[in-house]
Amino acid sequence: MAVRILFLGPLRDLAGKEAIEVSAPLDWSVLLQSVGEELAGQLQSDRVNVACAGRVLSDKTSLNARDGDEVALLPPVSGG
Amino acid sequence: MAVRILFLGPLRDLAGKEAIEVSAPLDWSVLLQSVGEELAGQLQSDRVNVACAGRVLSDKTSLNARDGDEVALLPPVSGG
Amino acid sequence: MRDIRLLDQAFAPESLTKPFVRANPGLGGYCTFVGEVRSEEDVEALELSHYEPITLPGMQGLADQAFARFDLMGLLMVHRIGEMLPGEPIVCVSAAARHRRDAIQAVDFCMDHLKSAAWFWKREKRGGEWSWIEPREADHHDLARWRK
Amino acid sequence: MRDIRLLDQAFAPESLTKPFVRANPGLGGYCTFVGEVRSEEDVEALELSHYEPITLPGMQGLADQAFARFDLMGLLMVHRIGEMLPGEPIVCVSAAARHRRDAIQAVDFCMDHLKSAAWFWKREKRGGEWSWIEPREADHHDLARWRK
């Protein structure tokens, strides 16, 4: 098992894929290294949220994903 | 022809009838005399409006009803 | 599209709102409020009286105000008169607009005015006895919001 | 009565609101808002994506807030996901309450939150090309009203 990093909305276009798998454990700095420079830049914006195992993190830098967790990168929602 | 004075809502119960007919012309003081003491008291309250010929009067004391006009006494509307 | 009516018979709100919505193609959203005679213990019936020469023109004037104040595509305003039973609709207001808040606010605005500033008199029957309903303070407060 | 759903197929709002209203006997009124995909020049389709583990729980949390804040008897909140055509309903919120302003305000509250604080991402297709829709300033402003 590993950690699945899922890209949502416009971040999926930026990533060019739906998800990547990385080995556990996954913390904030490893996440930034795993997603490439452009996405790492986006991730550092206040407007992008991170969910781990189905919960949106109030402090995304405290990320600590374990084997089998899904980490979702959540761009700003659309007002439409 | 004459002026018809129409009682609406709770004022109809107070009047004990739907309408009375009086001779034209009808001004404010004649109206007060025509409707009896209890209704005259009600009429002097700010909460009771008067319509003449299908228009609510902004100043009811300026009433000047002519032959064929209908004068309606409008109690406060119900919020319910 | 404007549809303002007084009805003296029971009505099904959907039978009015469905054609209303279809008559406003290109809308972004629509908001509908339906008020019913509340079933309270011992209330047997509600009666709404009106005064033909001013009640409907007053509702048309209210619709003019709503169109002036909000960016609306259409407004439906239907009010019952006569005797009604608990559970029956009394009023149905629906507003169609490009943007949601115009539709929602127009309904709020029209309902506050229909409750406190429209020419209707209500009485209710309990235990076989009719009694007139007095204006509610909360309704005047709701209405005052729009004068700011 | 609470009915919170995500739907991945086109729906007719009345088919949801009619049973909802019937499931809240004794209500004083109900307010319904339906948002549709606006027909704008050259918009061919709209797509809404979501994230299963948080989108529906987020809507349930929003319903909890609405019940805590307003005196409600029932709340229906239905949101489309997937690809939609102009004219199709995207969202339907209906609130049933004893008093009208609770119903109207609950719909206003839920819509503001669904627009700006719910986990949906929208893109639209124009001339065969998809592009993501950015948040609108007006929507954030609408949402901020409830924080006062």
Image (cartoon, coloured by chain):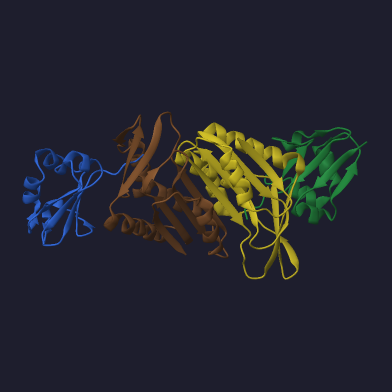
Chain colours: A green, B blue, C brown, D yellow
The reply to whether residue C78 is visible in this rendering is yes
Q: Residue furthest right?
A: A1
The reply to whether residue C98 is visible in this rendering is no
The quarter of the displayed image where residue C55 is located: bottom left
Residue C71 vs residue D33, the one in the foreground: D33
* Residue drawn where x is 40% and y is 51% of the image: C79
* Residue drawn where x is 20% and y is 47% of the image: B18
At which x and y percent is residue D109? Answer: 54, 43
Judge left or right: residue B68 versus residue D73: left
At which x and y percent is residue C64? Answer: 37, 61
At which x and y percent is residue D140? Answer: 57, 49
Residue C125 vs residue A7, the one in the foreground: C125
Q: How many marks?
A: 0
Judge left or right: residue A80 versus residue D109: right
Judge left or right: residue C138 versus residue D79: left
* Residue drawn where x is 52% and y is 55% of the image: C15
* Residue drawn where x is 77% and y is 52% of the image: A11
Classify D84 as above or below D2. below
Judge left or right: residue C58 versus residue C23: left
The quarter of the displayed image where residue D130 is located: bottom right
Residue C136 vs residue C85, the one in the foreground: C85
Residue A49 vs residue D70, the one in the foreground: D70
At which x and y percent is residue C119? Answer: 30, 50
> What quarter of the picture does the N terminus of chain D occupy?
top right
